[in-house]
Amino acid sequence: MTMRICTVVGARPQFIKAAVVSRELAAAGIEEDLVHTGQHYDSSMSRVFFDELYVPAPAVDLGVGSASHAIQTGLIMTRLEQHLSDAGHYRLLLVYGDTNSTLAATLVASKMQLPVGHVEAGLRSGNLRMPEEINRIVTDRLSSLLFCPSELAVENLAAEGLTEGVSITGDVMRDALEQFIDVAKARFDISRMIDHEADRYYLATVHRAETADDPDRLRSVVDLLASLDLPVVWPVHPRASKRLKEFNLTVPGSINLLPPLGYLEMLSLLSGTKAVLTDSGGLQKEAFWLRKPCITLRSETEWVETTRGGWNTVTDIDPDRVRTALAQRPTGEQGAPYGRGDAGKEIASILTGWQGKGSRR
């Protein structure tokens, strides 16, 4: 009998990951219904990724939109439960990463005795103040299949007593970069996007609530970016854009604000930057793979492997530490801590051979 699964996505990185895995699932003969929760509802943060990465059109859009963590999670749970009840038999529910969509879908599936597979399992920052950290821990605890991007992720799970159903697959974002980097550079020439030459600008992103929603921290980010020795290109997440206006923060001319960009546009800009400053998890890895120095504007990172060899420096929003890090060029060997670009195939292969023993309780 053909395996039929339900995949739940709701935020920008999840669309990119689904672009890789959904293609491999189809090639393996696995039927997939894609559910878009609507957590990212702006077309620049969702629809563009379906279009440019050829992600299958979602079977259902739950349309939850923006709200507090509790309201957003509750709406997703209510609407997803209805879909799962109406849709008939699924063998598995597949989730990605650490968003509210991930947590809500996992809770619903677990209560309905539907096994969960978690892509990007085992990540830990050690910071329980981050909503994402709570989402990761709960999702891993309830999942039957744990697809880990690295050896360290497996070790993190083992330290919590989770060893059953654990596999090292590599990171599907590595697959995506390998598949799309040449397309990105050919389709989106840097000279047509910005007024800066390659290696003569920094690329910055800020989107996490702990920074964007805090007026003092967001002001510190603006001041930091304005103080750097090169112009900064900043594609502004809708959350940060709203807060810049709400907090009445003036952004100086040395910071080039752009609207939210598609994945291919971001890859092109990343390929030409001198360095990256970000609070994003995904961009830390993409910078690492493209051998671009990364400054992480947080007090910790879940992607510990990127810090080896000096490729990623965790500075928080400390101007002196940031400038010191930017002055040092990485020299260390990287190895392949996140695999070599075949994670999607590995996940599809594991699912094909999986017998389905039910949810972890």
Image (cartoon, rainbow, N blue to C red):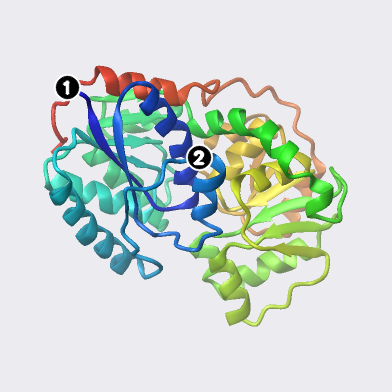
Give coordinates of residue 308: x percent, y percent.
Answer: 62, 30
In three-dimensional space, the C-alpha distance between marks 1 and 2, rounded to whole angstroms, equals 27 Å
With 107 as the anchor, is 15 left or right in this view?
right
- Residue name at image x 55 percent, y 20 percent: 340
Number of numbered discs visible in the structure rendering: 2
Please indicate, yes or no, whether residue 300 appears anywhere in the rendered image: no
- Residue name at image x 77 percent, y 48 percent: 324
Give coordinates of residue 23: x percent, y percent.
Answer: 43, 30
Is the residue 163 above or below the residue 319 in the image? above
Badge 2: few (under 14), some or many (20 or more) residues near its Cα, within 10 Å?
some
Query: In terms of depth relative to the viewer, which is nearer, 146 or 3?
Result: 3
Query: In terms of depth relative to the viewer, which is nearer, 297 or 84?
Result: 84
* Residue matched to label 2: 54
* Residue matched to label 1: 1
Say which element carries label 2: loop
Could you tell me which quadrant the C terminus lies in? top left
Could you tell me which quadrant the N terminus lies in? top left
Query: In terms of depth relative to the viewer, which is nearer, 149 or 301?
Result: 149
Badge 1: few (under 14), some or many (20 or more) residues near its Cα, within 10 Å?
few
The amino acid marked with disc number 2 is Tyr
The quadrant in which residue 319 appears is bottom right
- Residue name at image x 30 percent, y 36 percent: 32
Give coordinates of residue 344: x percent, y percent.
Answer: 44, 26
The quadrant in which residue 325 appears is top right
